[in-house]
Amino acid sequence: MSTIIITVASLSILGLLLAVVLYAVAQKFKVEEDPRIDIVESLMPGANCGGCGQAGCRAFAEACVKASNLDSLYCPVGGNPVMQKVAGALGFEVAEKAPMVAVVRCAGSCEKRPKTNTYDGIASCAVMNSLYSGDTGCKYGCLGKGDCVSACKFGALSLDPQTGLPVVDEDKCTACGACVKACPKGIIELRKKGVKSRRIFVSCVNKDKGGVARKACSAACIGCGKCAKVCQFDAITVENNLAYIDFEKCRLCTKCVAECPTGAIHAVNFPPKPPKAEAPKVAAETPAA
Amino acid sequence: MKTFSMGGVHPADNKISCDAAIENFPIPQTAYISMSQHLGAPAEPIVAVGDKVKVGQLIANASGFISAPVHSSVSGTVKSIETVKDIAGNPCKAVVITVEGDEWSDTIDRSEDIVREIKLDSKQIVERIKECGVVGLGGATFPTCVKLSPPPGKKAEFLIINGAECEPYLTSDYRVLVEMPEQVLIGASIMMKALNVSKGFIGIEENKPKAIEILNGYAAQYPDIKVVPLKKKYPQGGEKQLIDAVVGRKVPSMGLPIDTGAVVQNVGTALAVYEAVQKNKPLFEGILTVTGECSNQQKNFRHRVGTPISAIIEATGGMPENAAKVISGGPMMGKAVSNLDAPTLKGSSSVLFLTSEQTKRQEEYNCIRCAKCVNACPMGLEPYLLSKLSRAQRWDDAEANRIFDCIECGCCSFTCPSYIPLLDSIRYGKGQVMKIMRSRPKK
């Protein structure tokens, strides 16, 4: 009996003593942290994706608390609602930012861009890109090995087995930009989501001369410049045989879409226009964007 | 017999084209002469469309310290200066010449006589080699004149001629040794004079006894150059491995061969140096092996630089029926040709046809930690680890494990019992790490 009493008593005393020591140490080495960091962190989506440019959500919260305004800080995952809440918690004003979405700028599906050789190495775009220009005639286009898909933390990207190209799920895409960094060919771009998710973009990044580009892929931009001529808003520039539509200037008039001889300009989420021959193709592209 | 001390593998040597004497490949109708035939900055064209050029005429100037001039390999009219695709499909600038006849530049000595006396002094030799656009023909195509001018503070002690030709299938260096041994020895003597060294070695693997015998026959005439027979082991022809094999010195990590006092030059380079210095002939021809079990013919060709690979395939009976892959270079380190219209370069050493059985990728299994790759690595690296780190994109750890020392010989992938394509991911990782290292501010 006495053994038990001695054991319990000695352990209790030991525990009490150590608790006092621990308390003293904790008080002595206490780290003073701004309580607002915890508040801001609790507002964050908690994806830790790094899309904001910070190491994670807590790092972003710290940066927000330290910053004098929120102009250069934006959480693409949470978007405007989260930024409003953060601004409210910290007493800042924040301007609405247009939501963005990842856009795959390559339409070189298997039938439009025939394979010229077979690649049987590691299924990684980065490795494939380090070896050679790719298994089609176009050295700029999608390699189709899915580095973007594995980079996406939100499951917004998938490879379409029909076309071999990645497809962005607009509802899931948070525009964190991980896929943009993962793509060795620089095909994916973050573009303004647009009114009713309507967007017009050049779905090609081929900088070869028209003939060369066309030979490699029937959906390639040949840099003819017709779109730039028809655009009334100076939104389209043609550089290095490649057209680019500035999404800040584009007013979604779709004139360029009808003008493009190769169908390289895609208009997505527009209501279908039955009369034109091009229309079914555009409609077919809608889910793919 | 000597060999290098660490790692290495023994692939079957398959030198099936070794008895085919060197033939001149017919001059193509159109030559596509690439401006990027060497390591370093592409050459800058100095001819214009419509210009008439002769064989051996300078058509592009070197555009930097590590660069080399390019000479026309054919005579005719410059059709265009355009972007063509190289064997990997990547664009490169090229001078396209429509061939008319075969008129050589007057300054080139076209006689068959062997010129033994070296008239130029060491500075003039380096200058001539530079002017003639000679580059290392062992694979890396590093400008030879740079290698022959050691940086201040470094002193060359000896020259090693690389006749190992450890890559399976390739026989171009072997044919040069057998058919033009004296030219190679004179070329070596010229380089020894340029470097001001008195000792020279020619390392030859034991599977080429005829070459060793022939060169030994010249021992009395060229007493300074010693033939060193080497045990057959891949990658003996690697610069660092060859120095280790021949003189037993090790190139330090991140160091240059000159740190051991050695300058290594390939057999083909020695021949090019001989032709440049003694015959005033710029480098516009190369020896190229056409081979493979499925190949219609086994050939060794002297080709004009800029000949489309498709023309070579055509001339040897077309694409073999069961060929699945065409490789430029040997099967271990060569590059798959994804664009058959690509022109040959100064450094092109072979057109190798492999069948689908030979090139089939086996299904990849998990690493079983057998450490075969570690034993095989001639650089003392840990390939399984580097491959893992590369796949995980852990560049700092990859750098700490000396990924930059990888010579991309492929011994690890060759030896892996789980068929893991180790080198593919290591090569990618090496590229990324080197990029990061280069972007750092220099101390």
Image (cartoon, coloured by chain):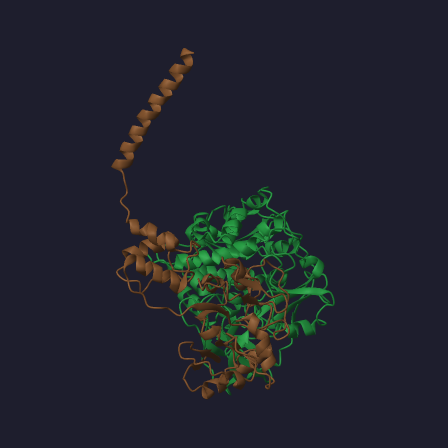
Q: Is residue B39 above or below residue B304?
A: above
Q: Is residue B140 visible?
A: yes
Horizontal placement of A187 versus A21: left or right? right
Q: Is residue B394 above or below residue B128?
A: above
Image spot of residue A122 (x, y percent): 59, 57
Residue drawn where x is 46% and y is 51% of the image: B394
Q: Identify the image quadrant of the N terminus of chain B.
A: top right
Chain coloured brown here: A
Q: Is residue A40 above or below residue B64?
A: above
Q: Is residue B219 above or below residue A235?
A: above
Chain coloured green here: B
Horizontal placement of A238 versus A93: left or right? right
Image spot of residue B427 (x, y percent): 52, 56
Image spot of residue B69 (x, y percent): 46, 73
Horizontal placement of B288 versus B266: left or right? right
Q: Is residue A218 visible?
A: no
Image spot of residue B166 (x, y percent): 60, 54
Q: Identify the image quadrant of the C terminus of chain B.
A: bottom left
